[in-house]
Amino acid sequence: MKHYLVVLILSLCTFMAHGKPKDDGSQIQPDNYYPRVKMHTTMGDFVVELDRSRAPITVNNFLRYVDKRSYEGTVFHRIIADFVVQGGGYDKDMKDLPKFPDIFNESGNGLKNQTYTIAMARSNGEHTANRQFYFNLNDNESLDPGRKWGYAVFGYVTEGTDVLDAISQVETQYDAVIGWADVPIEPVLLNKVTILPPL
């Protein structure tokens, strides 16, 4: 009986010391500083390499949503040719989706909002990014940090840039449901995001 109690106490101590397994995205390919994902859209697929070495908080946050399959069935709700393709926040009915807590703004990581990079969208507050992201369709220097906080870049498209170019050309209009201009008339869906094996 005493032996059983000792084993039980030691097991409890071990659990308390280590706690629950991490679930913040850092547990996904933890030794891979450049994880890759494939984005499957209704207009084709493209591959994005994420830069965990420069933007660990942002990459882990993004992978957390991917791991929970939270981006499946979302729409690209803001498309402006020669500027950005933005998505990740709404479903096909333009319903706002659940979010994890906002993250720290890593816009000072040295990565720039250059053509075909991926970055985090946010509201006016500096540290308000959570699930929405966008792809730069141009070198958007105005989105980089200066005397004020910028928008955190955390990767770039390595395959399928032609798909992004095609998405950027769809016809858009004002959407009264979410109060956004530049919403595609014909929805462009992100069907799923697949985490690719390390290179």
Image (cartoon, rainbow, N blue to C red):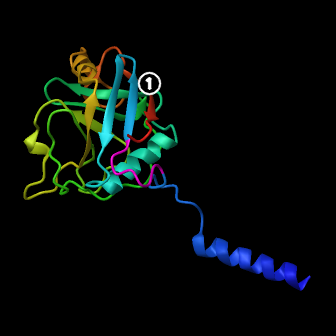
Expressed as whole percent of the image width and height from the top left, the position of residue 133 reads 31, 39
Residue that appears at 15% across and 33% down = 115
Residue that appears at 24% across and 24% down = 161
Q: Quadrant of residue 103?
A: bottom left
Outermost residue to the front: 199
Expressed as whole percent of the image width and height from the top left, the position of residue 34 reads 33, 46
Q: Nearer the viewer, residue 103 or 98?
A: 103
Q: Is residue 67 left or right of residue 118?
A: right
Expressed as whole percent of the image width and height from the top left, the position of residue 37 reads 39, 36
Q: Is residue 112 left or right of residue 37?
A: left
Q: What's under tag 1, amino acid-wise?
A: Lys
Quadrant placement of the N terminus: bottom right
Question: Mark 1 — residue?
Answer: 92
Q: Nearer the viewer, residue 132 or 155?
A: 155
Q: Nearer the viewer, residue 128 or 143?
A: 143
Expressed as whole percent of the image width and height from the top left, the position of residue 110 reads 16, 54
In magenta, the rendered stretch is: 28-35
From this view, report whether residue 153 is shown above or below residue 146. above
From this view, report whether residue 25 is shown above or below residue 135. below
Q: Is residue 25 left or right of residue 78?
A: right
Q: Quadrant of residue 186?
A: top left
Q: Nearer the viewer, residue 182 or 134?
A: 134
